[in-house]
Image (cartoon, rainbow, N blue to C red):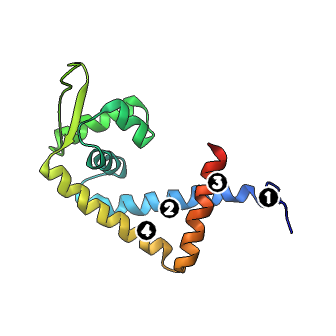
Amino acid sequence: MRKKGKTDKSAPEVLKLTRRMTTLFRDRLEEQLRPLGITAAQLQLLAALAKEPGTSGAHISRFCQVTPQTTHALLATTEDHGWIRRSPHPENARTLLATLTPQGMRLFLRGKTLVLRLQSRMLRTLTVAEVAQLEATLSQLIHNLE
């Protein structure tokens, strides 16, 4: 029996495989989102606002794990498309708070459906128990790094 904390030489493949899976997922998602006229990054921003309406750009940057500059560009683009609305914070006019418009919410829900379908496709050959084990393992890896 192997001790916890000990890894064999194949362990570095985990990072390569994880990166490959996320890259493929994002590529497939981008393909499916293209007809809707939205990118995966823009959808992630809409998801952040669906979860927490009235959010600042700084909070969105942290949620989406992108730079403030990227967030600023995403906010400007999504606002130009009419998917979000920004208004000054009641206590600090320099801070703009973003919320989804009805059009933005509809687009988010369509995109979310595509994400869930793609996720189902990715997991289709796994049993419920295997998916649960995968979630537990990934959660443990995250915990180990925190």
Instruction: Report which residue position mark 4 lands on.
Output: 119
Which residue in the structure is indicated by mark 1?
4
Q: Can you give x and y, in whole percent of width and height, for residue 101 in the image? A: 14, 46
Report crowding for label 1: few under 14, some 14 to 19, many 20 or more residues within 10 A (C-alpha).
Answer: few
In this view, the mark in front (4 or 3): 3
The mark closer to the camera, 1 or 2, is 1
| Quarter of the image that includes the C terminus | top right
Residue 101: image tag: none
Q: Name the quadrant containing residue 10.
A: bottom right
Query: What separation in Å lies between label 4 and label 1 (alpha carbons)?
Result: 30 Å
Earlier sequence position, callout 4 versus callout 3: 4
**Disc 4 to disc 3, how far (Cα)?**
20 Å
Mark seen at residue 141: 3
Q: Nearer the viewer, mark 4 or mark 1?
A: 1
74 left or right, relative to 127: left
Residue at image x 42%, y 63%?
Answer: 28
Q: Quadrant of residue 85?
A: top left
Residue at the outermost right position: 1
> Residue type at mark 3?
Leu
Instruction: Name the residue type under label 2.
Output: Leu
The residue at which mark 2 appears reads as 24
